[in-house]
Image (spheres, helix red, strand yellow):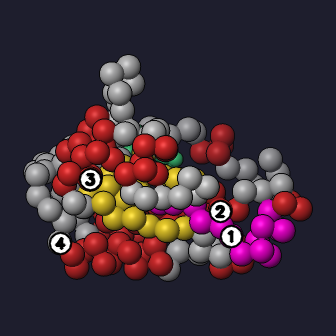
Amino acid sequence: MEFNELIQHRQSGRKYQNKPVESGKIEKLIEAVHLAPSACNSQPWKLIIVDEPEIKNEVAKATFNKAISFNKFALEAPVIAVLVIEKAKTIAQIGGFIKNQEYPQYDIGIAAAHFCLQAEELGLGTCMIGWFDEKKIQQLLNIPQKRKIGLLITLGYPPEGYKKRKKIRKPLDEICGFNSY
Ligand SMILES: Cc1cc2nc3c(=O)[nH]c(=O)nc-3n(C[C@H](O)[C@H](O)[C@H](O)COP(=O)(O)O)c2cc1C
């Protein structure tokens, strides 16, 4: 797929077939995260692939509750990838402090984008999830409490004929300026 086609096609998938994801495809997704750029090449992330059904279901259950149930679809996904934010290199920490920027947050966002675009090319659906019970997932996956979880990404095959939605985006002049704000 051409890159332009890839970014047109990718959308957040909230329905999945009950079908496992092949290990060869998982390896390609890991490589896509491995090659992502980061501030000072810190690579401040750890990717945890959760594909063991019982653990995966417990992680999925940590993304919704009775009151806030919009992430219930996570139960359908055969895989959930968890991006943990690791400590950045000292040079990136100093740079971030001086410039008042949280570089690792950007870094994991880029890594997540690599993951989702690679998945799209492989015919897989993804949805980034930023709403979850961090403590519960830390406990489930043995993640140290001092490590923040940046994002979860559901992964799996979309149902046959899963409809592509029209992209809802702000007008271009709101998100882009030439030579001035
Ligand atoms: C940081 C981040 C957090 C998100 N969290 C959630 C979430 O908790 N649940 C959900 O259904 N979608 C979530 N999304 C998906 C967005 O809703 C989606 O990307 C946006 O509406 C644009 O739609 P599209 O991805 O289909 O183009 C998240 C996306 C990002 C980048």
Q: Are marks 1 and 2 in contact (CB under 8 Å)?
A: yes
Please identify, in this view, whether the residue under mark 3 or under mark 1 is nearer the observer.
Answer: 3
For marks 2 and 4, give the CA distance: 30 Å
Residue 48, horizontal then vertical, whole percent = 39, 65
Question: Residue lying furthest right in this view?
Answer: 98
Number of the label disc, if any, that sits on residue 55: 3
Tell me the quarter of the picture where residue 115 sits: bottom left
Mark 3: give few (<14), some (14-19) or many (20+) Cα within 10 Å: some
Horizontal side, residue 7 vs residue 100: left or right: left
The magenta region covers: 83-96
Q: Quadrant of ligand 1?
A: top left
Task: Count numbered badges in the picture.
Answer: 4
Q: Amino acid at mark 1?
A: Ala
Mark 1: give few (<14), some (14-19) or many (20+) Cα within 10 Å: many
Which callout, 2 or 4, points at the residue further toward the start of the chain?
4
For marks 3 and 1, give the CA distance: 28 Å
Q: Amino acid at mark 4?
A: Glu
Number of the label disc, if any, that sits on residue 121: none
Q: Residue at x 65, y 79 (%)?
A: 41
Residue 26, horizontal then vertical, whole percent = 28, 72
Please identify, in this view, whether the residue under mark 2 or under mark 3 is nearer the observer.
Answer: 3
For marks 3 and 4, give the CA distance: 18 Å
Q: Residue at x 28, y 34 (%)?
A: 72
Residue 14, horizontal then vertical, whole percent = 27, 42
Name the residue beneath numbered marker 4: 22
Q: Mark 2 falls on what kind of element?
A: helix
Which callout, 1 or 2, points at the residue further toward the start of the chain?
1
Q: Residue at x 31, y 39 (%)?
A: 61
Q: Amino acid at mark 3?
A: Ile
- Eyeballing the image, is 116 above or below 76? below
Which callout, 4 or 1, points at the residue further toward the start of the chain?
4
Q: Residue at x 78, y 67 (%)?
A: 93
